[in-house]
């Protein structure tokens, strides 16, 4: 299992979502993708997409207005 950090600070939707989808496709089942975001739209859309796609998702607010969306690839 590996962890990959994807820095999407300063990027508005749908850029973080598209980058996360592309990066997750490169990873193996069990790997973890940590997407760093500071855009509230992405904070809503990214976890929603990952959950619907069947992955394990956790969101942590690391600073005021900055989040990490932690996605564990399950399939």
Image (tube, helix red, strand yellow):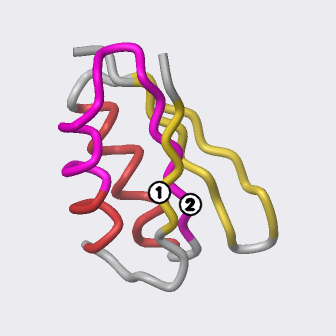
Q: In which quarter of the image is the C terminus?
A: top left
Relative to residue 53, is residue 67 depicted above or below? below
Give the magenta-colored segment's residue range: 20-37
Relative horizontal placement of residue 57, taking residue 38 as reference (left or right): left
Q: Does the magenta stretch include residue 62?
A: no
Q: Are marks 2 and 1 in contact (CB under 8 Å)?
A: yes
x and y percent of residue 47 in the render?
41, 45
Graded by Cα atoms within 10 Å as few (under 14), some (14 to 19) or many (20 or more), the crowding at tag 1 reads some
Count the numbered circles shown.
2
Q: Mark 2 points at which residue?
A: 36
Taking 65 as reference, is 46 above or below it? above
Residue 6 in percent (x, y) is at: 47, 57
In the displayed orientation, state which residue is furthest to the right. 63
* Disc on res. 6: 1
Q: Is residue 68 above or below residue 19?
A: above
Residue at the (34%, 44%) spot, across then down: 48
Spot occupied by residue 55 in the image (x, y as percentages of width and height): 34, 24
């Amino acid at each position: 299992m590996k962890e990959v950090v994807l820095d999407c600070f300063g990027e508005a939707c749908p850029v973080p979502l598209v980058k996360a989808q592309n990066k997750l496709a490169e990873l193996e089942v069990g790997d973890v993708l940590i997407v760093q975001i500071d855009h509230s739209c992405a904070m809503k859309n990214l976890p929603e997409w990952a959950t619907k796609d069947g992955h394990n998702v956790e969101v942590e607010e690391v600073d005021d207005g900055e989040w990490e969306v932690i996605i564990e690839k399950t399939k």
